[in-house]
Image: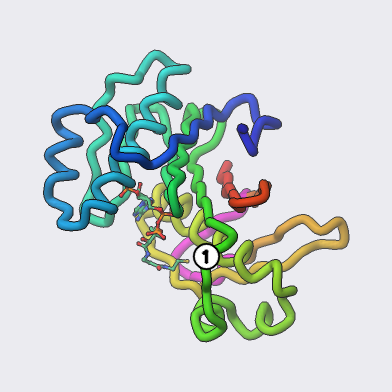
Amino acid sequence: MNPFIKFPALSFQEVEISTNLKKVLKEEEQILEKFKSKKRQLEFRAGRTAAHLALKQFELESFPLLREDKGNVIWPKHFTGSISHSNDLAVAVVCKKEDFSAIGIDVEYLKKDINDSIFKKILNKAEYPSALEEDKIIFFSAKEAIYKAVYSKTKVSLGWKDIELSRNDAGKLIANINKNSINIENQEIFENRNKDYIYTLALLN
Ligand SMILES: CC(C)(COP(=O)(O)OP(=O)(O)OC[C@H]1O[C@@H](n2cnc3c(N)ncnc32)[C@H](O)[C@@H]1OP(=O)(O)O)[C@@H](O)C(=O)NCCC(=O)NCCS
């Protein structure tokens, strides 16, 4: 299922994290080998597999997806994208920079047990405790998606509380980014879900 099918400019793919996945490109396997945890290696491989499938739409599936020190992916010139993994699912989304200057995606397993002390660290006073119980995980996910999009565009790392989320009268997620060093004006947040996962997407123009 593509949770963001209403955006034809985006190429989205998801891949189940499993030991049966084929190896990715040599340069990517070299990065993966440095991770000590087997689980981390498998999620990295699944994320790269999803990203190559997403890039296939642009005939760029063989482009090696290396990373910078902060963990962000180096996408092919004139393209941007984002990767996320949770539980046994990896997702990737890619687009041309002429369509969106940066994108961030996040997926969260809905049955993940996140206790309230974590939410208190993630949500700021205006969001907590006013966020509905169900919104807490959505806000958590949306902040990660926004973080990735903003980092990829500006190389600035946002903190949890630099982002303030709310919903407008129509229920749409609205983000305010409170960080003096950056000026992000045109951003939109989208969400979708199935019975197991919530997906959030941050699009910057
Ligand atoms: C980037 C971050 C938010 C990712 O979240 P996560 O829960 O670890 O995991 P996800 O599976 O959703 O995403 C991981 C993917 O994000 C991408 N990513 C990592 N760092 C990134 C960055 N700085 N910018 C953009 N994308 C990044 C990578 O593709 C990574 O997958 P890979 O290593 O397999 O390639 C988190 O790891 C991080 O660096 N946090 C530090 C700062 C922070 O917590 N700020 C508050 C958030 S508002």
Which residue is drawn at the image coordinates 15% and 57% (left, top)? 36
Which residue is drawn at the image coordinates 71% and 58% (left, top)? 173
**Where is residue 121 shown, x and y percent of the image?**
50, 82
Which image quarter is the N terminus in? top right
**Where is residue 199 shown, x and y percent of the image?**
59, 49
Which residue is drawn at the image coordinates 15% and 33% (left, top)? 27
Judging depth in this view, the residue of 58 and 193 nearest the camera is 193
Q: Which residues are magenta?
A: 177-187
Q: Tell me which amino acid carries mark 1.
A: Lys
Within the magenta stretch, is there residue 94? no
Q: Disc 1 on helix, strand or loop?
A: loop
Which residue is drawn at the image coordinates 40% and 48% (left, top)? 152
From the viewer's perspective, is 168 left or right of 194? right
What residue sits right under mark 1 in the picture? Answer: 112
Display colour scheme: rainbow
Judging depth in this view, the residue of 154 and 169 nearest the camera is 169
Point out the quarter of the image occupied by ligand 1: bottom left
Judging depth in this view, the residue of 17 and 204 nearest the camera is 17
